[in-house]
Amino acid sequence: MEKSNCYVVLFNSTHHALSAEKVLQRMGIEHAVINTPREFSVDCGISLRILPGDAAGIREALEAAGVAVAGVEPYRSRWAGASPAVNASGSQDGHESEDSG
């Protein structure tokens, strides 16, 4: 895989993913709700994309808020350079697909 340009926060349930989104909003961490990329094998189809600078300590912060995290993994998003909160159409707060096809 090419060098990562973001991190993907992975979950085992949609409930945890949506709870994590609320925690990140309260913390002021820029993020995007995305479809879980195919290369990650977890039970939830929703993940959160965050900037590399926000990855340190994110698992601990979410778990301290009661949110179970399946993983925080580096990823090469095709939306390189875009704000993580902007989806493919350029609008804010929408779901987007990380699939390349």
Image (cartoon, rainbow, N blue to C red):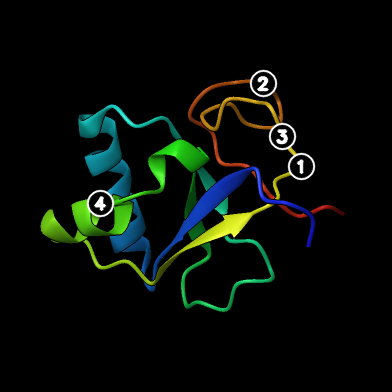
Among the two numbered marks 2 and 4 on one chain, the one whose residue lies closer to the N terminus: 4
Q: How far across and how far down the image is residue 98, in percent?
A: 69, 50
Q: Secondary structure at mark 2?
A: loop
- Disc 4: CA contacts within 10 A as few (<14), some (14-19) or many (>=20): some
Query: Marks 1 and 3: in contact by CB < 8 Å?
Result: yes
Question: Tag 1 or tag 4, which sits nearer the N-term?
Answer: 4
Give the labeled residue for mark 1: 78
Label 2 sits on residue:
90
**Mark 4 = which residue?**
19
Q: Quick one: label 4 or label 3, which is nearer the N terminus?
A: 4
User: Residue sitting at 62 percent across and 31 percent down?
Assistant: 87
Q: Nearer the viewer, residue 57 or 45?
A: 57
List the residue tagged with mark 3: 80
What residue type is disc 2 on? Gly
Q: Is residue 100 above or below residue 95?
A: below
The image quadrant where one finds the N terminus is bottom right
Q: Residues under labels 4 and 3: Cα distance?
A: 26 Å
Q: Position of residue 37 (x, y in %)?
A: 65, 61
